[in-house]
Amino acid sequence: MTGTRLRPFGTTIFSEMSALAARTGAINLGQGFPDTDGPAEILALAEAAMRSGHANQYAPIAGVPELCSAIAEHQRRRYGLEVDARDGVQVTFGATEAIAATMLGLLEGGDDVVVIEPFYDSYAATIALAGATRRLVTLHPPDFGLPLDALAAAAAGARMLVLNSPHNPTGRVLTRGELEGVAKVCIEHDLIAVTDEVYEHLVFEGEHIPLATLPGMAERTLTISSAGKSLSFTGWKVGWCSGPTQLIAGVRAAKQFLSFSGGTPLQVAVAGALGDAERHVAPLRAALRAARNRLCEGLAAAGLGVSVPQGGYFVNADIRPLGEQDGPAFCAALPGRAGVVGVPTTVFYDDPRAGRHLVRFAFCKRDAVLDEAAARLAGLASPRL
């Protein structure tokens, strides 16, 4: 029997849609994982670490020291952020554990958390686990702009703000003007800012600007990222959180009672990769930009409306040009109609009516897979008998 705090959440939509793809043999454009490995050079680093005899036991609770140092150096070199490598970095089992440890370590029962919807589903679940309550600010299609007036209204009396840019599921990259508005709200209302930046290296248009780089924000911002998305090793589950030492202390206090530590040789490999991150991510970013364009063209040719994402793994398609209105029903029928699996975007909103006409598709796949998916989807524009 599921406890009351988690009972409303059930099984994640990603598990459900991946199981549907496996059951039907459909092409899985639902869950965001690449269908190829990341760079062979990084795989070799992991293998060497495993064979060294020094990296197959528990890592320190904070993470392998060379990875903590590499994360701090990455933040300094790329963004000009000064982070304490020992007490300002916490390595986690993926960004999802970083989110959970942040909520459990820093929130009290009854706290309010401002969340931008649509949102990654673990935000709501981990806020509930902490006994806190979410306050929603909604991004609306087609441009998914951030309504700063609504954000300011939601922030009054809240404890924390969760921000995701580049954004999943919309692919928005927040502008400097939007981020300056967010910073103003955080400072005025004394909010802890938690930023999910797992797609930081995968920006196709615009510029990724960490919220922590804005004046007055470094001392109140926890930045979360991951090697899973940046380096195409989602199964390694190597994530991290960085920021002021007093906030990281709360994250670490919770993390030690979640997974404690592990993945030691994978942490060593990621440390080596982060030392020259741009060399590794630049080819991936170029390939993903081309894949985005490929899938967007295929969706448009199939008669769907397309919101071209600025970053990340996903594109949202409007099903109304096909005469459809109900995303969940459309996605449930899509494997049978076209042999493709997508995710109804409405599951990322609290309001079941919001985004109901949108479906999210992942483009982090090989060209042949995207081409086959586009060919299968092309039949949707034909009238059903």
Image (tube, rainbow, N blue to C red):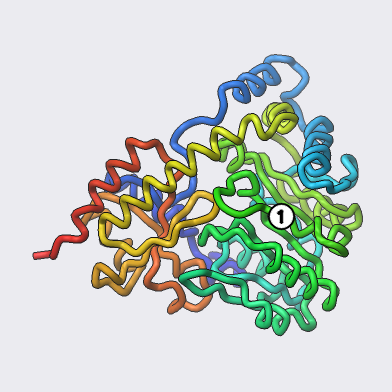
Residue pictured at 80% horizontal, 73% vertical: 184
Residue 318 lies, with reference to residue 67, above or below; the image says: below
Residue pictured at 39% horizontal, 67% vertical: 358
Residue 115 lies, with reference to residue 45, above or below; the image says: below
Residue 45 at x, y = what percent?
Answer: 66, 21
Q: Is residue 160 left or right of residue 146?
A: right
Residue 92 lies, with reference to residue 162, above or below; the image says: above
Q: Is residue 222 left or right of residue 331?
A: right
Tell me the quadrant of the picture where the C terminus can be found.
Answer: bottom left
Residue pictured at 68% horizontal, 64% vertical: 163
Q: Is residue 63 visible?
A: no
Residue 7 at x, y = what percent?
Answer: 55, 69
Residue pictured at 63% horizontal, 63% vertical: 123
Residue at which label 1 appears: 209
Numbered disc 1: secondary structure = loop
- Please name the amino acid that badge 1 sits on: Ile
Q: In which quadrant of the rendered view does residue 334 lie? A: bottom left
Q: Is residue 153 visible?
A: yes
The outermost residue toward the left is: 385
Q: Nearer the viewer, residue 183 or 115?
A: 183
Residue 62 at x, y = what percent?
Answer: 82, 41
How many marks can you see? 1
Q: Classify 10 Å Cα crowding around label 1: few (below 14), some (14-19), many (20 and above).
A: some
Q: Nearer the viewer, residue 350 or 10?
A: 350
Q: Is residue 68 left or right of residue 348?
A: right
Q: In which quadrant of the rendered view does residue 102 lie? A: bottom right
Q: Nearer the viewer, residue 89 or 303?
A: 303
Residue 353 at x, y = what percent?
Answer: 43, 79
Residue 85 lies, with reference to residue 177, above or below; the image says: above
